[in-house]
Image: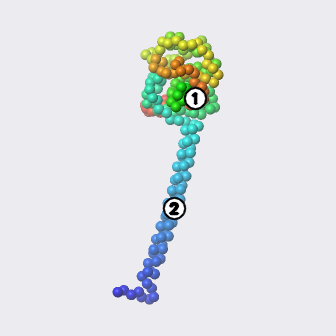
């Protein structure tokens, strides 16, 4: 059996090595902990910024249906500018995302045709605003309707909206005017599909 020499023991020889390893491990553990805290702070900050952007700035949306064809197609991906109407007003011709007035849990994408105070009427599918025919070259011939509507004056704080696919759109002709508070924002960009990406 091996006997320690010169007053030293095997346990005494091993203790500094074990203590050193423990110290190195604790230092590394502290570094990893600091890194995890830093990552957590970064992710938490990113989540807060994303929430603020979605709530007050921009929103990604997807088109469902063909009511805005040919301008927008089913499943197009959009970026909606929610700041636009916090600092300004919807204008005729704007493409907007809005809450469906009859069921605000649903949202639609439509085009603003008339603003508050405007008189709107439709004759054989042609839209007149304040007795002036509205330019509508964005409406494909096969998508035109031949209905009549009005004349009527848009109340204060409300807007008249329509889909570009006039004969296949549920809009203000059917469920009335849209209050400004229901307009989520202005459709700013179609970013998908990439080959048809467009800034509105």
Q: CA distance from mark 1 to mark 2?
A: 50 Å
Q: Residue at x 54, y 45 (%)?
A: 47
Measuring from the top left, give residue 200's x and y in whole percent.
Answer: 52, 28
Measuring from the top left, give residue 59's x and y in whole percent.
Answer: 53, 35
Q: Residue at x 41, y 86 (%)?
A: 4
Measuring from the top left, give residue 183's x and y in whole percent.
Answer: 57, 28
Q: Residue at x 63, y 29 (%)?
A: 88
Residue, disc 1: 182
Secondary element type, mark 2: helix
Q: Residues within 10 Å of mark 2 (few under 14, many from 20)?
A: few
Point out the residue furthest to the left here.
1
Confirm whether residue 33 shows in the render.
yes
Query: Mark 1 or 2 closer to N-term?
Result: 2
108 or 196, which lies in front? 108
Point out the residue furthest to the bottom here.
6
Q: Residues within 10 Å of mark 1 (few under 14, many from 20)?
A: some
Point out the residue furthest to the top here.
124
Q: Is residue 21 above or below residue 1?
A: above
Give left or right: position of 151 versus 21.
right
Confirm whether residue 93 shows in the render.
no
Give left or right: position of 59 versus 86.
left
Q: Is residue 43 above or below residue 145?
A: below
42 or 183, which lies in front? 183
Q: Nearer the viewer, mark 1 or mark 2?
A: 1
Label ID, residue 31 = 2
Measuring from the top left, give residue 114's x and y in whole percent.
Answer: 58, 19
56 or 192, which lies in front? 56
Image quarter in which the N terminus is found = bottom left
């Amino acid at each position: 059996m091996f006997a320690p020499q010169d007053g030293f023991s095997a346990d005494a020889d091993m203790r500094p090595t074990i203590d050193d390893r423990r110290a190195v491990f604790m230092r590394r553990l502290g570094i990893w902990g600091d890194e995890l805290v830093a990552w957590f702070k970064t992710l938490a900050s990113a989540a807060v910024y994303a929430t603020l952007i979605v709530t007050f700035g921009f929103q990604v949306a997807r088109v469902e249906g063909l009511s805005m064809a040919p301008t927008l197609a089913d499943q197009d991906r959009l970026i909606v500018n929610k700041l636009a109407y916090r600092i300004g007003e919807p204008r005729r011709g704007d493409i907007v995302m809005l809450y469906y007035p009859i069921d605000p849990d649903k949202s639609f994408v439509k085009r603003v045709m008339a603003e508050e105070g405007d008189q709107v009427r439709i004759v054989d599918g042609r839209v007149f605003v304040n007795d002036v025919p509205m330019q509508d070259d964005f409406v494909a011939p096969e998508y035109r309707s031949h209905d009549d509507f009005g004349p009527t004056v848009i109340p204060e704080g409300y807007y008249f909206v329509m889909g570009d696919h006039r004969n296949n759109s549920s809009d203000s002709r059917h469920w009335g005017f849209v209050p400004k508070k229901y307009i989520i924002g202005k459709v700013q960009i179609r970013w998908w599909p990439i080959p048809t990406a467009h800034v509105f």
